[in-house]
Amino acid sequence: MESRLAALVIEGLKRAHVRFVVGLPDSMLAGVYVAAEKDPEIRYVAVTNEAEGASVAAGTWITGGRSVLVMENSGLRAACEALARLGLVNGVPVTMLMGYRGDLGERFHWGVNHGMTMEPILKALRIPYWIIDREEQIVPAIGRAVVHGISSLYHTAVVFRTPLVDEGK
Amino acid sequence: MKRYELLKQLARLVTAEDLVVTSIGGVKPEWYSLMPSNGTMFADLLGCATPFALGVALNLPHRRVVALDTDGGVLFNLGALCTVGKELPPNLTIIVLDNERYEGVVGGPPTHTSGRVDLERIAEGSGIPCTATVREIENFFEAATQMLSDGQVGLIVAKIEPGLFKDIPPERAKESDGIEDKYRFMRHIEKLEKISIRPRYALE
């Protein structure tokens, strides 16, 4: 059964006329990848790393196919060079949806570092972001991030934190 | 085979209806001087030409899309070939300009393709159905002609000599930056597809 989180994300994507979901699977947003792949109105493109994903998403976007990149927040580090070049040199936006691994209360030692670096990297790259933790924020946050990408021609991000996301066992 | 000669042949095959995505490197000024329209996205990132072109090809399946990638670019992001092999966009042709070196770096140090690494075999193993390695200009033209018309995704490894073409006429020299390149490409797509990618007011 599709999770409430996944259903709301898909609703937000459709309201924002997003047609492509580019992703590298992670646990926190696990249901979103599955829902995107199943949805007949969305083309899900699985990639091998987040830098590649940023480039694929940029390629669809600049030709009129609105897209988002879905990933764990560690993917932000993997995608840094691609995001810097695409955003700062070409001005082609990538809207990212990511789970907040390493948030206060993180239970996995390997996840703590993701939280330590996420916001500093978003700030270093001057990427506007919205950290959300309530269901009613999901649809408007996605809509605003997509619209801001269009108006600014620069990247945007929505970060999903507890209790919205499944932190894993 | 020199890159400029190869690009001249490619310019005979690419029409104003087609779209091209280039890697960084010497290919940019040379292709700019030859290209038939604003239908080229000059991406400024090593390793992004093929995945960027994949995104273009997936979004506009009715258009032929050419990725002008390099040995250094493909090696930087080998996983992209696997994604192409999974998605199999029939309208995408990848041309890898393989001079076996990082030409833009002082001294032109070798890439791994100068040794035993074979990008065509990697592409085959990634599931790309149509591949070729060419060393002569006639073979390139033949392979490119076929791959641009066969309706399936293909990859050509073109072994080229190092060296930049030095005689580009001043009026055909590339002076634009990445932002201008992006606008030209985006506006070209808007006209070609009769769509609005970046409306004056972005409505939710």
Image (cartoon, helix red, strand yellow):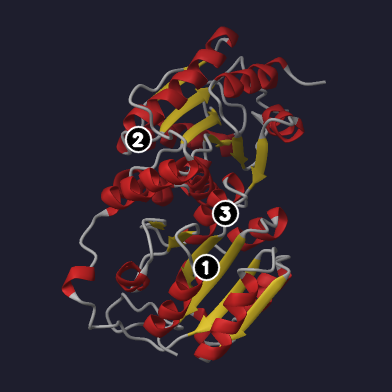
Q: Position of residue A20 (x, y in %)?
A: 60, 37
The residue lying at 51 percent from left, 21 percent from top is A142
Disc 1 marks a residue whose amino acid type is: Val
- The verdict on a common chain for dots 3 and 2 is no
Task: Give me the chain letter of mark 3.
Answer: B
The residue lying at 42 percent from left, 50 percent from top is A82
Q: Position of residue A159 (x, y in %)?
A: 50, 25
- Residue that mark 2 sits on: A153
Q: Quadrant of residue B64?
A: bottom right
Q: Position of residue A148 (x, y in %)?
A: 38, 25
In contact (CB < 8 Å): disc 3 and disc 1: no
- Residue that mark 3 sits on: B63
- Residue that mark 1 sits on: B74
Q: Earlier in the sequence, mark 3 or mark 1?
A: 3
In contact (CB < 8 Å): disc 2 and disc 1: no
Task: Give me the chain letter of mark 2.
Answer: A
Q: Is residue B165 above or below residue B42?
A: below
The residue lying at 61 percent from left, 16 percent from top is A164
Q: Residues within 10 Å of mark 3 (few under 14, many from 20)?
A: some
Q: Is residue B85 above or below residue B195?
A: below
Q: Quadrant of residue A153?
A: top left
